[in-house]
Image: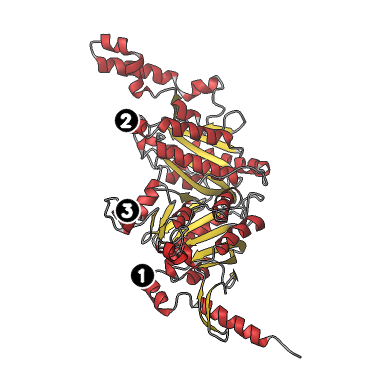
Amino acid sequence: MVGWNAELEELRRREALAREMGGPDKVRRQHEGGRLTVRERVERLVDRGSFHEVGAIAGRADYDAQGELTAFTPSNCVMGRALVDGRPVVVVGDDFTVRGGSADATIREKPIMAERMAAELRLPIIRLIEGSGGGGSVKTIETTGRANLPGGVGGTQLYHQTTANLGLVPVVTLGLGSVAGLGAARLAAAHYSVMTKTSAMFVAGPPVVARLGEKLDKRDLGGWEIQCKAGAVDDAAENEEEAFALARRFMSYMPASVHELPPAIRSRDDPARRDEALLSAIPRDPRQAYKMRPIVETLFDKGSFFEMGRWFGRPVVTGLARLEGRAVAVLASDPVFQGGSWTADACQKVIRFVDLAETFHLPVVYLMDCPGFAVGLEAEKTATIRWGVRAMAAVNQCRQPWCTIILRNAFGVAGVVHQPAGRFSLRYAWPSARWGSLPLEGGVEAAYAAEVAAADDKDAKVAEIEARLQKLRSPFRTAEAFWVEEIIDPRDSRRLLCEFARLADPLRAPGVAGFTMRP
């Protein structure tokens, strides 16, 4: 019997060469820089032993005159399928030990296949990014003898699938080193992105920027403080292990694709749990800020709140949480920043987060304390009202079940944007709630200008008018007219939110086609 042992030995040899990546010197340099290799990253990210690599022996080979393999450089794209907490995913990573992860050292069909695999198998995709642009360096012009046309004939498939997947499957990206050009675009094209605090991301690196007169090092140009505060990347991790943990945690709230529902888990947290601290959570002085995150932690299942994008759009808090084990999207005001008023970047944050909830069938809970849109010169210069209208459109287009609890302020046009218009949603108000077209503070002087100007003591007159109006704008007066449905004891909030999650469970709609998540 003639077997195929020789061929199998050749296969194992080539696989071993691929595992050497860029060679021992390049691997050592990777480790000396405090970074893992791409294969080590995959092993640390996924369930042990679950990675099934595709295209491991693809690369560039040299042969002698007899046609025997003499040298082999693997493609610097490593990809395949794996399990994360027992659930299948697609993983694709850049190998920085081979030409610094540059696209001209890869085989373009590999990342394209990874994206298509995720789309066609309806699996989440996790990108481990440490590389550069889509057409290689300027040196590529000399090695190929021609200039690459971005998006030229046959060159659009990766761009198409990368953005198309945002409307199909959960996309997580991790920036784990220097990320530029196409790498930066792939990092930003995600539902959730993380960069390590030693990494940097930029459209073009320091040498290119220096030609424009800005001499900056990598961190000053595109370090985590820059990118997270700008909203280009969602979160920063102290190290790669923490980045992997964040990716796994985000994935735990996500369905495999838009054709499924987010997974529920068993919760031992009492849905009727009441916290006495909620009675004093909101200060009586409307000018006094308070911390929103302890309220969030109290209302949702213990330890379940997973915040996203903390450094961007800070008047708004966004994250994922659970109610009786069911995944929900949490939107909350943060009065510590701008009093919770919606700035231009806060509106951008709302748009993207509500899109995420809509795409992956997550019921929305909004804990509201919004005194309106931010005002002043900076607000006008950043087109706050334009972004505010876009936020309104995102909320109004959201078809997921929605529940709002008004904790304190609800004023102006931004105050309107606390639930989807034109359809039913649940709404509750705490006794601390206050609302109107404009806050009384500052509004009295404008509305009662003549009366105030005629008074001998202008401050006393303003105080008199405000005291009169305060009684009229009691939330109980609004409830009398059924302009607000329910005013509740704050301690009942968790019970009512858990009821909302139960009611919402059968209403979510997997498999809705045609919605595209905006990056």
Mark 1 and mark 3 in contact (Cβ < 8 Å)?
no
Residue in front for this viewpoint, 60 or 203:
60
Q: CA distance from mark 3 to mark 1?
A: 24 Å
Q: Please, is residue 393 above or below residue 15 in the view?
A: above
Q: Which mark is residue 33?
A: 1
Can residue 33 be seen here? yes
Q: Earlier in the sequence, mark 1 or mark 2?
A: 1
Q: Secondary structure at mark 2?
A: helix
User: At 43% across and 53% down in the image, what residue appears?
Assistant: 235
Res. 224 image quadrant: bottom left
Q: Is residue 442 positioned above or below 159 on the image?
A: above
Tell me which residue sits at (64%, 50%) in the image.
Answer: 261
Q: Is residue 500 left or right of residue 460?
A: right
Q: Is residue 512 above or below residue 75?
A: above
Point out residue 482 in the picture as x, y percentages from the top left corner. 56, 22
**Residue at disc 3, secondary structure:** helix
Q: Earlier in the sequence, mark 3 or mark 1?
A: 1
The residue lying furthest to the right in this view is: 1
**Residue 377 got which mark?**
2
- What residue is disc 3 on? 209
Identify which amino acid the numbered label 2 is placed on: Leu
Q: Nearer the viewer, residue 114 or 40?
A: 114
